[in-house]
Image (spheres, rainbow, N blue to C red):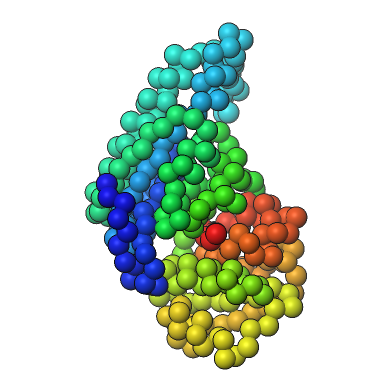
Amino acid sequence: MTDTPATQSGSGAPRGRVLVLLDGSRMSYAALDAAADIASKTGADVLGIFVEELNLLRSAGFGFAREVGSESGVSRPFGTAEIEQRIQRLAEHARRALAVAAARYGGRHALSITRGSVVDEVLALAQPNDLLVLGRVGWSSAPGARLGSTAKGLWRRSPGRMLLWCESQASSRGRVVVFLNDHDDVNRRAIMAAADAVWHTHQPVTLLLGAGVDIPPDRLEPIKQDLGVSDSDFRVRTLPSTDPATVVQVLRQERAAQLVLSRDCTLLREPGAEHLLATLNLPVTITP
């Protein structure tokens, strides 16, 4: 695989790789399908990441260690040999799934297999121009209104954009909603990410302004041009409040298919930010 970035059609920004974390969970393979689709549209290389969790291997080394099936509730031995075999099976399955996805969409791909802490290993591979795609929960968590530990550890620390994928199919008929506040640099990063998202889908866009934020009309026209949308596919709406319940309600009213925002925005500095990300049943792109 080459790490030399190509030029992206949408924003003219340098294009890095599409990284996707594969952990054997159903959600991670849904994220793989999304990552391969994005790569096919942008010409980016796909790097699958499979991490052999060191803490899991260490815990299996204790003689008293047991595991309980999430569905059966049956307790069974939890030894190092069994975990090593399971990890090898999952890694091979990830390799095959990546090859199948790449063949379906075309493009170059590779699988990186490392051992250590998942968050640390992903951060060691990710570059500022890369897009990191991962499911909101992993193999050790059932889907629900929460974020997995890996998503929690990465959404504030990823050096580039991060796409939190959800289990439901993203609608190409919905709107891409971009949350903006009163910080120009933060807004610019979110707008460029939204421009990339709508470049191939031609979806309408809603600018969602934080409470008290006012963008003058003369600044809206350049934003609309950056997004590449027409007047009929562009609108602005102000949030009355940034509490999670209100945000979810407004997004439903907008028929949002994707939310784009910066991790430095006021919305993600609210106490309920983590709950909001977990509750939203739509893809969320978080920019640095």
* 236 with respect to 17 (left or right): right
Q: Is residue 132 above or below residue 41?
A: above
Residue at 69 percent of width and 56 percent of height: 273
Q: Residue furthest top?
A: 63
In-image side of 8 versus 269 (left or right) = left
Q: Nearer the viewer, residue 234 or 44?
A: 44
- Relative to residue 170, is residue 143 drawn left or right? right
* Residue 107 position in % (x across, y down): 25, 53
Count of labels in the image: 0
Q: Residue at x 60, y 40 (%)?
A: 149
Task: Identify which residue, 97 or 130, lies in the foreground.
Answer: 130
- Residue 31 seen in this snapshot: no
User: Is 269 drawn above or below residue 137 in the view shown?
Assistant: below
Residue positioned most to the bottom:
218
Query: Quarter of the image holding residue 144?
Result: top right
Quarter occupied by the C terminus:
bottom right
In the image, residue 97 sits, relative to residue 278, either above or below, namely above
Q: Position of residue 87 (x, y in %)?
A: 42, 25
Task: Specify whether residue 191 is in view.
Answer: yes
Residue sitting at x 73%, y 66%: 242
Q: Position of residue 225 (x, y in %)?
A: 45, 84
Q: Which residue corresponds to the image point at 42% horizontal and 68% vertical from the top-left?
A: 196
Instruction: Looking at the picture, tell me which residue is in the foreground, 235 or 223.
Output: 223
